[in-house]
Image: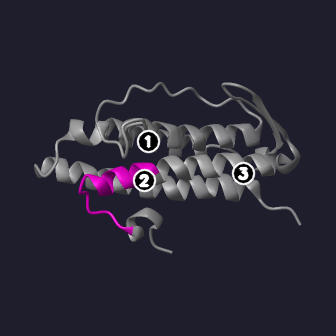
Amino acid sequence: MSIDLYRLSVGTFLRQLEHLDHILEKAETICTEGRAEEPVVLEGRLYPNMFNFTRQIQLATDFAKNACAHLADIEAPKFEHMEHSLADLRKRVAKTAEYLRGLPHDAFVGAHNRAITIPQRESTLHMSGDNYLLDYALPNFYFHYTTAYGILRHLGVTVGKRDYIGPL
């Protein structure tokens, strides 16, 4: 029995992007209320050598759209990293979700066996579609999503587990 990679990729990413937008909205609220400064949130990091909050959101959305494009065997749209506000980041999340909603389910037929090649800095990864999604794309997406969540918690944004995973 093969797994439905459309449901596992598009479905999972759409659900988590909805939650990501929700925590971005909470970050906007604390900035509007004067409990945090937006530039501090955007540049926030958990450790000096880690990417900042803005970059974590950009990478999470990149992994979502690029993973689905690879699995559907189509070219992903290029989203420039030009976000300078929480509102810009929310638009990026919305644009990513809109792209994913437009992907046809039938483009994922056979994706579990599709050969995926990912160039890296020092090597090139070669894997099947199911291994790519389960062992590379989803872990990378969740890493950046979780790090963004952690940065917000670190900065005092009142987000919790229910914000992160949403209602079941």
As for residue 153 lying within the magenta part, the answer is yes
109 or 81: nearer the viewer: 81
131 or 49: nearer the viewer: 49
Range of magenta residues: 147-160
Would you say the residues marked 2 and 3 are in contact, meaning their CB atoms lie under 8 Å apart?
Answer: no
Q: How many marks?
A: 3
Can residue 21 be seen from the camera position used here?
no
Please name the colour scheme applied to the rendered image.
Answer: one colour
As for residue 34 lying within the magenta part, the answer is no
From the image, tell me which residue sits under label 1.
57
Q: Where, quadrant-wise, is the N terminus in this rendering?
A: bottom right
The residue at the point 55 percent across, 37 percent down is 62
Q: Is residue 7 found left or right of 25 in the rendered image?
A: right
Helix, strand or loop under label 1:
helix
Helix, strand or loop under label 2:
helix
Can residue 108 be seen from the camera position used here?
yes
Q: Is residue 130 found left or right of 143 in the rendered image?
A: right
In the depicted structure, whether residue 121 falls above or below residue 131: above
Would you say the residues marked 2 and 1 are in contact, meaning their CB atoms lie under 8 Å apart?
Answer: yes
From the image, tell me which residue sits under label 3.
135
